[in-house]
């Protein structure tokens, strides 16, 4: 056999072996789907016209939900059976569609709150075409979760619940749901990121995936390659209303905690610290003496909160919570939220360049936030200016009362200079500079005179009732 022919045949064999090896390395979902499809359900809801039009005139129920969400982060709408439209004159009921899955043989079903919100009738359709009525056990809008109970449910197929905390970025996952009303559609992909914080919810550390998720998948399960549910498909990032390569799922660890509370108590209790936090960027890290950006910077401690009782202060940077490192500010709210009310947590914080340990008894997250109250402050010094490109004046007592702050100076003019470059605006109230409290114009002048030249320093301002830290380089 000629040498050239031998080489050609060897190359063909090698290419075929390489392709076969590559094919074997890809996951096979067939058995996983067969084993789990029976516990995935289609959820159909009916909303009567009087209920559907009880809100804004002329705006249908589903569209009102979409209007209330942050731009680009939209809840899933219901598919072709519920096109937007209708109004006060439309007497036809609205039928909508979503997904869910059974977690107990006696008929408990998990789905998204926005799938069933406002529904007058809920029908659960199983893989074997049975259609069973379901009642709403409870909802938790903060996590966008709802728990249903199938009436007369007995010996129903159930999913196997896994542990989302064991997920790793790059791991294969797959979803089963009803996108656009196409029942039991399977899509697959990988975990793109973990612990994502979205503008619509700070207490859920979302799983980000590239699994194709579309309207109708909402509330359906996200599985790992062990056939275990690790998340509930909940939101998509979209500019078109369809899949764009990024989707988000509620971790099953958090979902099961919500499920148990709704099933047993009818409501959900979350831990509460009582602080406003912000991200630590590179400049803030430098100004606070951190070698790299990490942790959650406390911009404000709410009056009467667990944080205040524990001695936390504005300007503290939370580095760890109960032994878990806080790398991003978005890491902290889910950690606190998962802590049972009344339990004591240990915080490691950076204060004045030194790390200290604090014990805090976690409170219950208020339903509608908490109001703050603090004593008024006054300052008899006259207006002042500084070589930072801004002029300040004493904080009026009535303004301190209305903003709920103690002391500070009001910025009344900002020109070109360090203050303008830092983002300070006229009307801002400066309460701290370079980690020194500022309660008067004189203290402001002293703080300015002691600023290190050419080094980033932090400035705490209260703007429109909210505290934040800015970085200024004199």
Image: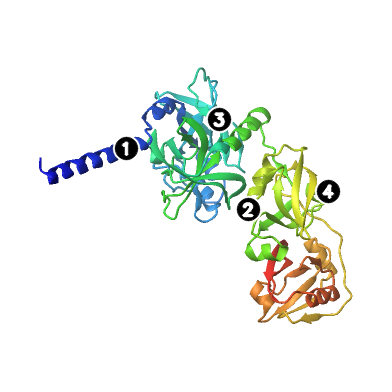
Badge 2: few (under 14), some or many (20 or more) residues near its Cα, within 10 Å? many
Residue under numbered circle 2 = 328
Work out whether mark 2 precedes mark 4 in sequence or the reverse, and give the earlier one.
4
Provide the secondary structure element on which disc 1 rests. helix
Disc nearest the viewer among 2 and 4: 2
Provide the secondary structure element on which disc 3 rests. strand
Work out whether mark 2 precedes mark 3 in sequence or the reverse, and give the earlier one.
3
Disc nearest the viewer among 1 and 3: 1
Nearest the viewer among 79 and 247 is: 247
Work out whether mark 4 precedes mark 1 in sequence or the reverse, and give the earlier one.
1
The CA span between labels 4 and 3 is 39 Å
Provide the secondary structure element on which disc 2 rests. loop
Which residue extends farthest top? 155
Residue 45, position as x, y percentages in the image? 48, 35
Count of marks overlaid on the render: 4
Nearest the viewer among 171 and 155 is: 171
Residue under numbered circle 1 = 21
Disc nearest the viewer among 1 and 2: 1
Query: Residue at the location (52% across, 17% down)?
Result: 154
Residue under numbered circle 4 = 309
Disc nearest the viewer among 4 and 1: 1
Disc nearest the viewer among 4 and 3: 4
Give the numbered dot on residue 148. Answer: 3
The CA span between labels 2 and 3 is 35 Å
Q: Mark 1 touching mark 2, by CB under 8 A?
A: no
């Amino acid at each position: 056999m000629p040498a050239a022919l031998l080489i050609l045949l060897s190359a063909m064999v090698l290419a075929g072996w390489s392709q076969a090896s590559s094919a074997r390395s890809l996951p096979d979902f067939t058995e996983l789907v067969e084993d789990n499809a029976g516990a995935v359900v289609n959820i159909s809801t009916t909303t009567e016209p009087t209920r559907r039009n009880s809100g804004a005139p002329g705006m249908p129920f589903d569209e009102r939900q979409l209007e209330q969400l942050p731009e680009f982060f939209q809840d899933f709408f219901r598919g072709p059976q519920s096109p937007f439209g209708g109004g006060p004159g439309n007497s036809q009921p609205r039928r909508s569609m979503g997904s869910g899955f059974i977690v107990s043989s006696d008929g408990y079903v998990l789905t998204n709150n926005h799938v069933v919100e406002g529904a007058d009738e809920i029908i659960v359709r199983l893989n074997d075409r049975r259609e069973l009525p379901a009642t709403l056990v409870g909802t938790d809008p903060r996590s966008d979760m709802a728990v249903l109970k199938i009436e007369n449910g007995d010996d129903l197929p159930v999913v196997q619940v896994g542990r989302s905390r064991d997920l790793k970025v790059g791991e294969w996952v797959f979803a089963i749901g009803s996108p656009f009303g196409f029942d039991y559609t399977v899509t697959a992909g990988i975990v793109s990121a973990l612990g994502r914080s979205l503008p619509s919810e700070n207490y859920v550390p979302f799983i980000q995936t590239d699994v194709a998720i579309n309207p109708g998948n909402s509330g359906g399960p996200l599985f790992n390659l062990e056939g275990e549910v690790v998340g509930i498909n909940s939101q998509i990032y979209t500019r078109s209303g369809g899949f764009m390569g990024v989707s988000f799922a509620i971790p099953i660890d958090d979902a099961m905690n919500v499920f148990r509370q709704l099933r047993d108590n009818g409501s959900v209790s979350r831990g509460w610290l009582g602080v406003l936090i912000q991200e630590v960027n590179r400049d803030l890290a430098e100004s606070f003496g951190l070698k790299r950006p990490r942790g959650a910077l406390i911009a404000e401690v709410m009056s009467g909160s667990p944080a205040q009782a524990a001695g936390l202060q504005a300007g503290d940077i939370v580095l760890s919570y109960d032994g878990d490192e806080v790398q991003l500010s978005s890491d902290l709210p889910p950690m606190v939220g998962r802590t049972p009310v009344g339990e004591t947590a240990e915080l490691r914080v950076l204060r004045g360049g030194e790390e200290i340990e604090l014990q805090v008894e976690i409170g219950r997250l208020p339903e509608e936030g908490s109001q703050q109250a603090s004593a008024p402050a006054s300052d008899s010094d006259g207006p002042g200016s500084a070589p930072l490109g801004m002029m300040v004046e004493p904080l009026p007592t009535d303004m301190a009362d209305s903003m709920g702050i103690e002391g500070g100076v009001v910025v009344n003019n900002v020109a070109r200079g360090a203050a303008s470059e830092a983002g300070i605006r006229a009307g801002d109230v400066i309460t701290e500079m370079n980690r020194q409290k500022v309660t008067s114009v004189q203290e402001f002048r002293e703080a300015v005179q002691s600023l290190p030249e050419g080094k980033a320093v932090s400035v705490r301002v209260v703007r429109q009732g909210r505290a934040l830290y800015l970085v200024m380089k004199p």
